[in-house]
Each structure stands twice: as C-alpha cells, then as structure tokens.
Image (cartoon, helix red, strand yellow):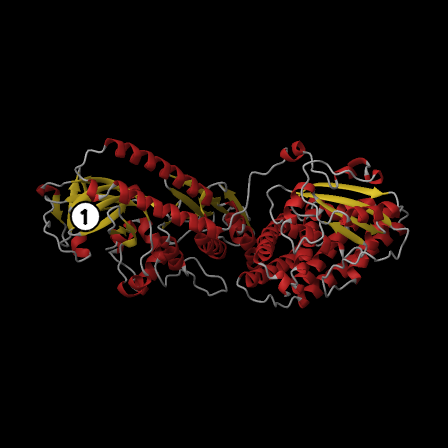
Amino acid sequence: MSEQFTNEPMLDMYIFETTQMIEQLEHLILSGEEESDFSPAAINEIFRIMHTIKGSSAMMMFHNITTLAHTMEDIFYYIREKKPENLDCSTLSDFVLEGVDFIKVEVEKIKNADQPDGDASVLVADLQDFLTDLKKKNEKAKETVEKSGAEPGKQTQDEQKKEDVKNTQNEKTPQQFYISQDKSIKMENENANCYKAVVYFDDECGMENIRAYTITHNLKDMTEEYYFFPEDIIENESTMDIIKENGFTIYLKMDASFEVVESFFQQTIYLKKLDLIQLKDNEEYESGRTVQNTQTELVVPETPIKLPSILLEGDVQKTLVSPDKNVHNQSVQSIISVGVNKLDKLMDLVGEMVIAEAMVTQNTDLQGLELGNFQKSAQQLNKITSELQDIVMSIRMVPIGPTFQKMHRIVRDMCKQLNKEVKLEITGEETEVDKNIIERISDPLMHLVRNSIDHGIESAEERQKSGKNKVGTITLEAKNMGSDVLIIVKDDGKGLNKDKILKKAMENGLFHKKPEDMTEKEIFNLILLPGFSTKESVTEFSGRGVGMDVVSKNIESIGGTLSVESVPDKGTEIILKIPLTLAIIDGMNIKVGNSCYTLPIISIKESLRPKKEDIITDPDGNEMLMIRGKCFPVVRLHEKFNVKTDITKFTEGIMVILEQDEKLVSIFADELLGQQQVVVKGLPEYIIRNKKIKGLAGCTLLGNGSISLILDVGGLMHL
C-alpha cells in the first residue's frame, strides 16, 4: 500500500462503510433467497453496493477484494440489464454469501493492521462460470422465443451504450491508480459527449475530500478525459470545506448517454444532490477548464462569483456559487458517526466525575457543619451530573435488531447443511442495550440458535408425523424489564427430556442435591453445567448442552443470568437476563468489620434486623432466616470473606434479602451505610487469576476515597 493511503481517517472510513455495506448486502441476499427472486430494487441496490466496494477497495489498493467485488458486480449488472428468466437464486446466493464471508475476513485483517492477502481466485472463477452459464441459458431462451414466432426484445441505443461502457470497463485490469492532472491531454474522440456534474454530499457525512477522490478514481474505469475542482483533494484537507459549501465539480467527456453518466454519479455513497448537465460542445468543456485554472486558490465566497455567460445555463450557475441554504436545510441530517473509543473515554470521564462529586459532597471534613448554601450547590451539581450521565449512557445505547438480524445467516446455512426447514421470527428488535453488552452477547446468541436448529428442531418428516408444521420456528425476542433486558430464544422443537438429563447428570456426578428434591427448572438448568450434553451423536454442530456452560459464563461475566424452560414436544425456551449497561449502577453500601461492600439496589428485596426467634437451623445444620412463613438461606459475609468483626450475633447486625432469577438469599452484615451511584471497575487481573474469589463482580471508589467491593448476587447464591 502506498504511503499516500496509510492515513487513518481514510482507512477508518473504508472499514466502517464496507462493513455496513456488507451487512446490508447479506440481508438483501437472504431476503431474495427466501422469496426465490430478487426484486429490481434489490438488484439495483446489490449492484450499487458491489460497485462502491469495488471502487473504494481499488482506491485503497486491496486488489483481491476489488477483483471479487468487480466479478459480483458484473453478474448483477447482467441480471439488471438482461433480466434473465429461471435465475438460480439459491446457487447465486451461495456464491455471493461466500464472497461476503471472504470480504469480512479481509476487512478483519485490515482492522488488525494485517495485510488482506486472502486468495479469492477460486471463488472468482466460480462466479465467472456462473455468469457464463447464465448468459448461455438466456441466449437459448431467446432463441426458443424467436423460433416460436414471438418478436424478440429489442435493445435500445442507450442500453447498447451502457453495455459497451461496461465491456470496456471489464477489459481493464487497473494496476495503478494515479489520476493524471496533465491539462494538455487531447481527446481521441472529438465527437464524444461533454458533461458537467456538481456533487453535493450529505451535510454530516464528513471527509468530503476523500469521498470526492473516490468518485474521480471510479471515473478512471469509464474515461480518461475529465478534470475536477478543487484539484488537491487528497493533499489539502481545507478542500473539505469548499466541497461542503460549493459541491464537487467535475467536467468529463465520454462516449456515453446522459442516463449512463447519471447512473454512475447516483451510485455515490452519501449523495445528497446531483446537478448534471450535458454541455453543448467542446468549447464549453474547455471554458470550464479555464474557469477552474483561474480559481485554484478559491476560498468559500461570501458573494457569488461572476462566471462567463457561456456557463450560465440552467443549474450550471451553481458550480462555484454558494448553494441555496434553504435547499440544504431541508435535508440536514442530525446524526454523526463517533468512534467507540471516544465514547468509552467519555464514559470513563463521566464515571470519574461521579466519583469526584461524591468525594466533594461526602467529604469527612464537612461532617457536623451547617452549610446551607453548599448543600444547595451540591444538589445542583448532583442534578447536572445525573443528567450528563443519562445522556452519555443513552449515546452508548444501540438497538439489538442488527445482532438479531445476523442470526438469519446462521439459520440459513444450518438448514442447508442439516436438511431442515426452519424460519426465524424476531420481536422487539428496537430494544436498546449498551454497545459493550451487544458485543458480548453476539456469540452466545449464535450458539443458542445453532443448538436450537441442530438438537431442538426435528426434521420435516418427524414434525409431520407428530402433527406439527414441517417448518420449525425459532423466535428471538427482546424486551425491557426495569434496568435489565430480557432476551428469549425459543423454539417449537421436541423439548428437553428430563429423564435423559437426570441420567446424564448421574453418570457425570453433576448433582448438587438429591434428584427428588429438584424442581423441573433446576433439572433443565443442569444442561448449563460444564461437560453436559444430551446429544448422542457427534456432528460439526454442538448439541444443546455442548458448550452451554461457556454461554452461561459469558452471560454471567456481564452481570446477567441464564435459565432454561422446556415442555416435551412443544419446545424449549432459554431466557437471558442482562443489564442495560455495565458502567454505572445504583448501589447500597454495607459494612462488615473495617471493610465495605456494595450491593446492586435492583437485587435488594428488603433489609431488617432479625429477632432471635427468626433464626432457625435446618437438618443439615445450615442457618436459615424465617420471615412471614418463608425460609431464606443465610450467608455470613464475615465468614465467607474472612473479615474480622465484633458483630457476629444476628440480632446486632442487619439482614439484607436479595433476589435474582427467582432465587432468594439473606446476607448478614454489620450495618447499612447508605445508597450511592457507583462506577463499576473490573477487579485487577492478578486477583482474578490467583485468588479466584467467588461472589465478587468488581470494585468501586467511594466518596471518602476508600475502595468497596461490588458483590455478585448470583455468585452469593452458590457460596
């Protein structure tokens, strides 16, 4: 890659936009395959995507991606122009999705600063063979129509020109991407059409100069006769402002119709407006060059520049004139792209500010002082801090829909390989979750969907024998529940077999209590334990239970829980309960000896000071708290964490009853210190690696500067 193209903004833009377009392409292909047909709109959009990826990849010197995208573009160009009948959508989808996977891998290499050196030659050859076969079949179909006496479709002159331009493009194999700025180039074809285009980009797209360069680079495939303004779009970043205000002006000469040229420019990504006119003759084309050469030092003018009268035709006056503000304001975008690392840094700073605010307002130097004005100011500071925190949190929230949509590809591929018929239904895709959470649940969701298809959903024959629809259904649902989000993965398969689960658990010694004392839900949750599987035969796909312990651990690592419900012959439902965000929580601080711990407020059911008669002992010698006829197991924190304290009698301390995943536990501490918003920090790596202490979710810094350990309620249940 040349030094010119190693600047990060350009590379970041390429990665971001290529990733977005690939995801959109995958969705279009899956939708078309499901309908067994590609609509004209879908074909046009797929062609536009491949054309854009081809151009931007060529500009960045990623030749393997360029060649692959070019080949796929050729296929959809042919489909768009010739509209062949009996198109094999399934085979085409296989090839294109294989290409999507290839580009994904290459983009990931680019992200990691590696060379995108994948070999796409075999896939390119397969795609070319597919196109050749498609052309042969289409020609035979035309011959059949002609022999039957029907009038064959006539190709218009414009269509012929489009094909000629495309054929010319296909014959070129660009090795270098330098655009000549030599103004003395003479046209080989004096009768070619002359055009002038002014391209306006969306107001908030950013990096207009690089986007303009992409257009000029793509033009090289169509004509050598063109020039543009501003000239130094790569070297001079100030050209961004000129392009944003006045548009990007291009004069070109080529033997193509107005419609072909317009189609080329309409494929520009983030295009807001296009002013395109066909110039009368070569004199206008050269006059534009003259105006360009006299304005090389142009800055954005406050008043319109007077142009030669020969250029003042129709919309051409807007070439070097500040565009109509009212026109621009009608389509102003209120969305900008911000790097995730910047949002993470902003979140960290807000977290530090929350801690600093607590340090100021809860400073021990202020205890016992009557400071009315200070308290008012402190309340105002707290209000502003809370609002700022809410805004930053909302910025990080993204819909879960795109993560759900990715599962369509998993369903499609597995159904083909396992010869099953399954449809995916999605509900609540607009539900928003913190971006970091989204990234952590993608793999667990994929594993659960794969398991549902492989082990849960029966074959079409089995389903029909049992009176079910031969097409199985997997439902992904997301919904808010307080400060948590519920994600439900449900199938209508054969469900879990309790007897098989119990037998397998007994063979592997996985019981933590007698089977007869276990509820149905506890039996089903055994499949979440390490090494558990009810799958009798080994395939390339995991059966339900294989790796489920990893899924469970991944969900627990972000403060979530996972539970399983099932009905024989009706299906299985797996519920993921995850927090909206990992960054800041409302906590209750408690004291044990000289140590401080923090409990998530959302998990606290109630707190109380028990009486002597409220404490009982079960037959196994475990202490229990009896309140209103209900028993709760008791966890003495000072014993579990080996903390010295003078308060060891229940009647002298405080009991806090916690609830999570329909389970209840009572923890015993010295006293409650009060409620506080806390910033969640991860435990140091050496503690996690060496100590392996259960029941801790992280730590936080208190207002007095001391450290408090955040308790993991789920972990406390198993202490």
Query: Which quadrant does the C terminus fall into?
Result: bottom left
Viewer-proximal residue, 12 or 151?
Answer: 12
Horizontally, residue 537 falls left or right of residue 178, namely: left
Can residue 587 be seen here? The reply is no
| x and y, in percent, of residue 548 in the image | 40, 58
Three-letter code, disc 1: Lys
Q: Is residue 115 above or below residue 674?
A: below
Viewer-proximal residue, 147 or 399?
Answer: 399
In the figure, residue 63 lies in which quadrant? Answer: bottom right
Horizontally, residue 414 falls left or right of residue 634, namely: right
Name the residue located 49 percent from the left edge and 62 percent from the top edge.
541
| x and y, in percent, of residue 225 in the image | 81, 54
Name the residue located 39 percent from the left edge and 41 percent from the top edge.
389
**Marker count (numbered):** 1
> Which secondary structure, mark 1?
strand
| x and y, in percent, of residue 489 in the image | 45, 48
Query: Which quadrant does the N terminus fall into?
Result: bottom right
In the figure, residue 587 lies in which quadrant? Answer: top left
Can residue 427 be seen here? The reply is yes
Horizontally, residue 448 falls left or right of residue 703, namely: right
Viewer-proximal residue, 281 or 569?
Answer: 281
Q: Residues within 10 Å of mark 1 (few under 14, many from 20)?
A: many
Horizontally, residue 117 falls left or right of residue 174, namely: left
What residue is disc 1 on? Answer: 591
| x and y, in percent, of residue 394 in the image | 44, 41
Name the residue located 86 percent from the left edge and 57 percent from the top edge.
186
